[in-house]
Amino acid sequence: MLLYTDLLLTLFSNTTIPPGAEIDLRSLTQPVGIIRIIAAFLTCTTFSLVAKAGYQTLSYWAWCMFTWCFCFFFTLLIVVLEFTTFNGKLPFSWEDFTAAFAMLASLMCLISSIIYPTFFTCPTCDYQIAASVLSWVCFGLYVGEVVLTRRQPTGQNSGFLSTLSGIMKMLETFLACLIFVSLETKQYSGVPGLQWCVAVYSLCFIFSIAIILLTLGQVTSLSPVSFDKIVVAYNIVATVMYVTAMVIWPLYGFKKSGTRPSNCERYCWWDKLVVVTFMTIFNFVIYTLDTIYSIYLVFFVSNQ
């Protein structure tokens, strides 16, 4: 640890600091800071290996690349902001944001670590195998960050994204992203029932993101109506909408072919229909739990 600290002091001793910023070397030498630096390096290495292996036109390949690039960028951004102490000048709870990002990055790396080796790795694909292994290591690092931030007694983990409601909102948007990755225009083109399902996924995703941003930005108090009650009403509507999608999507999606076609290869349109179906069911469960919990908080806990 002393050698690591001395190296950092040497690297940054001659660095010009912008006005209003201070250096916080301790943010890089703490266990969480070390984990973030390693995670940034490994996510960068992972997407570099995948890019070296070659571009793929499949949407799941794009999702995996987006995951590693997204995690690299925001991990590096968090490291820089904490190192320069600019994080204290941001208009939202920094601890809440970093804890939420670590949980989201863990989920994204977990899914990518399953998808990429499943569809894009072979016994002789050296770059792909190395990228798959590093992706699992990144998942472990982000899980470790979640555990460490949760154990810190000084961490302000009472923010929205660190609560059960915030976690469920992140899960709802995350599962919606997996649905979008699996959607193809030809799946629902010309079928009004399936187009309604796509509208459900899109509208619920947009409103869930809006709720997260408004709460994270601490502007919910500006609402003329109780924001918590607005969220309850939205959760009820979203749950009902997902009920219709959960019924309509498999009903119309598998209408032409109830079983997997014999000419369907390792990765085809039928597999995507299955993924969307299961993600719709999972998201319906999350929305239902979110609705029950929000009703409990607003109409029972707050009235005590």
Image (cartoon, rainbow, N blue to C red):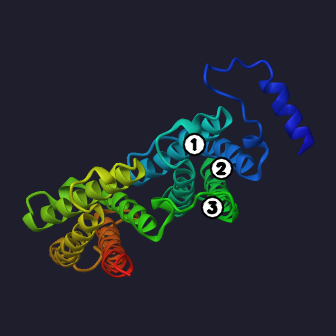
Q: Can residue 52 be seen by looking at this rendering?
A: no
How dense is the environment of label 1, judged by Cα within 10 Å: few (below 14), some, or many (20 and up)? many
Quadrant of residue 28 within the rendered picture: top right
> Disc 3 marks which residue?
146
Q: Quadrant of the C terminus?
A: bottom left
Disc 1, SS: helix
Mark earlier in primary sequence (3, 1): 1
Q: Quadrant of the N terminus?
A: top right
Mark earlier in primary sequence (1, 2): 1
In three-dimensional space, the C-alpha distance between marks 2 and 3, rounded to whole angstroms, equals: 31 Å
Q: Are marks 1 and 2 in contact (CB under 8 Å)?
A: no
How dense is the environment of label 3, judged by Cα within 10 Å: few (below 14), some, or many (20 and up)? many
Please tell me whether residue 199 is drawn above or below residue 43 in the rendered image: below
In three-dimensional space, the C-alpha distance between marks 3 and 1, rounded to whole angstroms, equals: 16 Å
Instruction: Please name the amino acid that badge 2 sits on.
Output: Asp
Q: Position of residue 121 (x, y in %)?
A: 56, 57
Instruction: Please name the amino acid that badge 1 sits on.
Output: Phe
Q: Position of residue 115 (x, y in %)?
A: 49, 61
The answer to which of 125 and 132 lies nearer the viewer is 132
Disc 3, SS: helix
The answer to which of 217 and 3 lies nearer the viewer is 217
Task: Tell me the number on the disc at residue 126.
Answer: 2
Q: Position of residue 69 (x, y in %)?
A: 52, 42
Determine the residue positioned at 38% across, 64% down.
169
Q: Are marks 3 and 1 in contact (CB under 8 Å)?
A: no
Q: Can residue 105 be seen by looking at this rendering?
A: yes
> Disc 1 marks which residue?
72
Instruction: Please name the amino acid that badge 3 sits on.
Output: Val
Please tell me whether residue 142 is drawn above or below residue 240 in the rendered image: above
Mark earlier in primary sequence (2, 3): 2
In three-dimensional space, the C-alpha distance between marks 1 and 2, rounded to whole angstroms, equals: 22 Å
